[in-house]
Amino acid sequence: MESDPKYSERFCSPDSDITVSSSDRVLFKLHRTNLGVHSDIFPGVEANIPVQDEIVALEEEASTLELLFQYVYPQRQPDLSKLNVRELALLAEAAEKYSVYSAMEVCRLYMQAAKKRMPMEVLMYAARHGYTELCDEAAPYTLDADAAVALKVMEGDLFKKWMLYREHRLRHHRRIYYSAINLGHTHEFEEADGPEECYLWPPFLWAILQELGKSLVAIHDSESQELFKKHRPMLEDCEECMRRYFSLETSVVTGSFFLPKFTAIQC
Ligand SMILES: [Zn+2]
């Protein structure tokens, strides 16, 4: 036997003229005027359609609707910094789906801030809703995702585009390895008793290659700059090593700068 529906404690006004049900059977008693002012496409708010005593069933869970409806009433808005990434992604999607304008922009900003914590979700959200810059910001952080998983979750041509985007990064990654190793593991410098190999370069190269091998995200422009800077002190006692360092850093950072952005990929 199905249990009785629960009512939202926050949205239970006795003079409501529309009732909405969440997918997990929580009822929200709302006002069409508020929904109509804040959303163009909210189901049930059309003029001349009597919805008294009818329930509009939505696909979202109560926890998402509880947050969303706070944006259609004049009250303090919820603190999105307290949400976990799943709650945030669901709210951002609902705000877009129902065009709740007062929630859309703040959700976009929080999704942007979450791009490293849930890059794939942010990329899909941005692609679905036409946020071009956010697509390009999130895409580099998706590079370590398993392609089989990406295939399952990405809609339409997004997966093809993502594979082509990743292909450019994979080739760049290979070029970095090749040029780093071909700079030579050692160089010679003159000592009183003849030329000797510099001991600073091999441990530096080893540290860099280890980090590059961990993740494709490391070759993203800002990330790669940080990676190089972090290990630079290992070489600072040797002029020749520093010369090699700048040559390698420039080729990696410049190379990554010229890689096509996600939204520039055609397929
Ligand atoms: Zn050296």
Image (cartoon, rainbow, N blue to C red):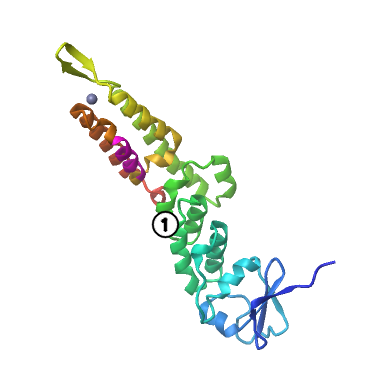
Instruction: Estimate the x, y position of residue 230 in percent, counting from the top left.
Output: 32, 39
Label 1 belongs to which residue?
Answer: 134
Instruction: Estimate the x, y position of residue 232 in percent, counting from the top left.
Output: 28, 35
* Residue 188 visible here: yes
* Residue 258 visible here: no
Specify the farthest residue to the right.
Answer: 1
Nearer to me, 234 or 240: 234
Within the displayed image, which quadrant is ligand 1 positioned in?
A: top left
- Is residue 66 rendered to the left or right of residue 236? right
**Image point 30% across, 21% down: which residue?**
185
Nearer to me, 215 or 229: 229
For the record, the magenta segment spans 223-232
Instruction: Estimate the x, y position of residue 72 in percent, counting from the top left.
Output: 54, 78
Nearer to me, 1 or 190: 190
Mark 1 residue type: Leu
As drawn, 29 above or below 147 = below
- Number of marks: 1
Q: What predominant SS class does the magenta segment belong to?
A: helix
**Image point 46% across, 43% down: which residue?**
143
Specify the farthest residue to the left.
Answer: 192
For label 1, the SS is helix
